[in-house]
Amino acid sequence: MMRQPSKAERLKAIRDLVASTPIETQAELAAALRSRGYEVAQATISRDIHELGLVKRLTNDGRSVYALPQEGTLEPGTRLSHLLPEIFRGVAAAQNLVVLHTLPGNAHAVGSILDAIGWEEVLGTICGDDTCLLVCRDSKGAEMVCQRLEHYASTS
């Protein structure tokens, strides 16, 4: 029978796993946790990834794996200007909504950075695997956010 760990134990196990094992997907993370005796739902893993601030990093062989954030090294705007040019696939506004497309496995990292930046035009983000939905206050704000994201994507 699988034991139900405390949240602190589970978060520590996730930190240990991503620091020592190349994990590309939430399903791989769930399997790795199961092998350590933890049974968690996908929604819990998603929340834990967000809470830990895990990011996706490219490995030398081009794989995108979860990694711990580098504490205190870069402010969110700088992190966005480093990450977005490598993973950006497109952005479009529709009324007060912005849809941002990234390489698979990277939308969550961008959403976390955007949440940390706290642009006043953005009320919130919802991210999947390769798409991030930004809900803006109005259509003018959505257009401004699109332009800003395109600018960040073009910097290197």
Image (tube, helix red, strand yellow):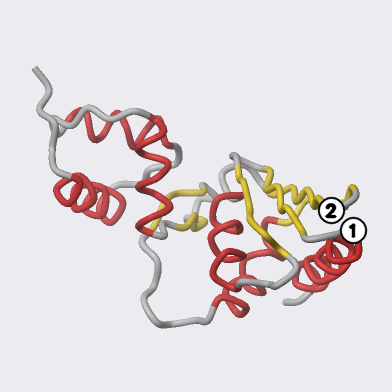
Residue at 75 percent of width and 51 percent of height: 100
Q: What is the count of numbered marks?
A: 2
Question: Would residue 31 appear left or right of 129 to someone viewing this image?
Answer: left
Which residue position is annotated with label 2? 96
Q: Position of residue 153 (x, y in %)?
A: 76, 67
Structural distance between the alpha carbons of marks 1 and 2 = 4 Å
Mark sitting earlier along the chain (1/2): 2
Q: Position of residue 58 (x, y in %)?
A: 52, 56
Q: Which mark is residue 139?
A: 1
Residue at 14 percent of width and 48 percent of height: 9
Q: Secondary structure at mark 2?
A: loop
Residue at 31 percent of width and 51 percent of height: 18
Name the one closer to the observer, 134 or 52. Answer: 134
Q: Image height check: is 8 above or below 104? A: below
**Kind of residue indicated by mark 1:** Ser
Q: Position of residue 14 (x, y in %)?
A: 26, 48
Quarter of image, res 136: bottom right
CB within 8 Å, label 1 to label 2: yes
Residue at 25 percent of width and 52 percent of height: 20
Question: Would residue 47 appear left or right of 76 to someone viewing this image?
Answer: left
Q: Image height check: is 83 above or below 57? A: below
Question: Would residue 9 appear left or right of 141 to someone viewing this image?
Answer: left
Are there few (<14), some (14-19), or many (20+) residues within 10 Å of tag 2?
A: some
Q: Quadrant of the N terminus?
A: top left
